[in-house]
Amino acid sequence: MNIPKLKIGNLMPKYPLIQGGMAVRVSTAKLAAAVANEGGIGVIAGSAISPEELSSEIKKARELTKGILGVNIMFAVKNFIELVMTSIESKIDVVISGAGFSRDVFGICKKSDTPFVPIVSSLKLGLISEKLGASAVIVEGGNAGGHLGTNKDSWDIVKEIKDALTIPVIGAGGVIDRADMDRMFKLGVDGVQLGSRFLASIESDVSDVFKQLVLKAKKSDMMTLVTSVGLPANAIRTKFSELIASGKNFEPKKCYLCLKECSKKFCIFEALTSAKNGDLENGLFFAGRDAWRINEILSVSEIFKNFFNNKN
């Protein structure tokens, strides 16, 4: 199958692949630079970190690659605009945002001539994004990892949105291997975004405990719950995630005031940090609904070879 060319503003990666910006501190400089070096768009997760830390990660990534780098910042975080401005000042190539929708950021990015790519889960938001000046949209289904905007799978929503828009459309959710990518391209998308496949990579910053949890997961181990952000999310089943899904509260002893709105039933920042560090008792292990299909830890280079080697 022919591989489409992805153009986001003036950016043209060798391969039409974006790495998901997984927070907290999962998608850091090391992973983003490795993806960019292979010809994709490497993305740093800019949520739940300070502007100074984000600036430092962008600088580290720049030292590791001459490829295309982006940041992904959740609209739900309180310092969203500050983090966007920090990214722009740090000369990031593209800004990506999900977990809510901001109209202001379109103008901010346009003023600095920085491409902006919102993550959308409906035709309505796709059309609004195009009208406001988005350089592209990432269409994310309910089968993706992290916070979600719909219960419909990516396979059920991308074609409708692609057919209605003139800007590039990137499909996200359920892309684990080459066959999944080809399936996305057959629906007409211009590119794909991968999260979970890179989560289980050598360059991913999560602990080996997290990576092994992905490898050992069965289909029945994948579950959906509502986090303190107020949005559904897909995660790997653990005792902690089951307690959260059952409605049990873990009121934080310390509030980081990191979100615009928070139920305070538990601290999502601490839960995701604990997961990154491999704490099975207190961690919330976000992963796409199809992450159970991953059966080996690969380098970013090996992942790209599996997706594109001798196929383009």
Image (cartoon, helix red, strand yellow):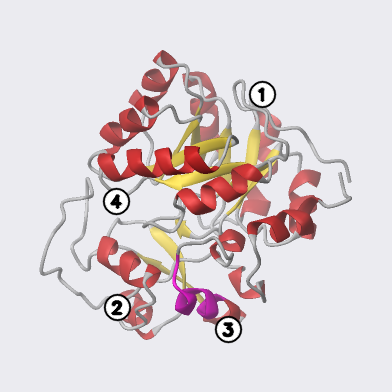
**Numbered tag placed on residue 166 in the rendering:** 1
Q: Is tag 4's residue or tag 1's residue first in the polypeptide sequence? A: 4
Spatial CA distance of label 3 from label 4 is 28 Å
Q: Is residue 127 magenta?
A: no
Closest to the camera, between mark 2 and mark 1, is: 2
Left/right placement of residue 197 relative to residue 304 reads: left
Spatial CA distance of label 3 from label 2 is 19 Å
Q: Secondary structure at mark 3?
A: helix
Residue assigned mark 2: 282
Residue assigned mark 3: 216
Question: Magenta stretch?
Answer: 206-214
**Numbered tag placed on residue 48 in the rendering:** 4
Left/right placement of residue 121 relative to residue 153 reads: left
Q: Residues within 10 Å of mark 4 (few under 14, many from 20)?
A: many
**Secondary structure mainly formed by the magenta segment:** helix
Q: How many marks?
A: 4
Residue in the image at 15% along x and 51% along y: 257
Q: Secondary structure at mark 1?
A: loop
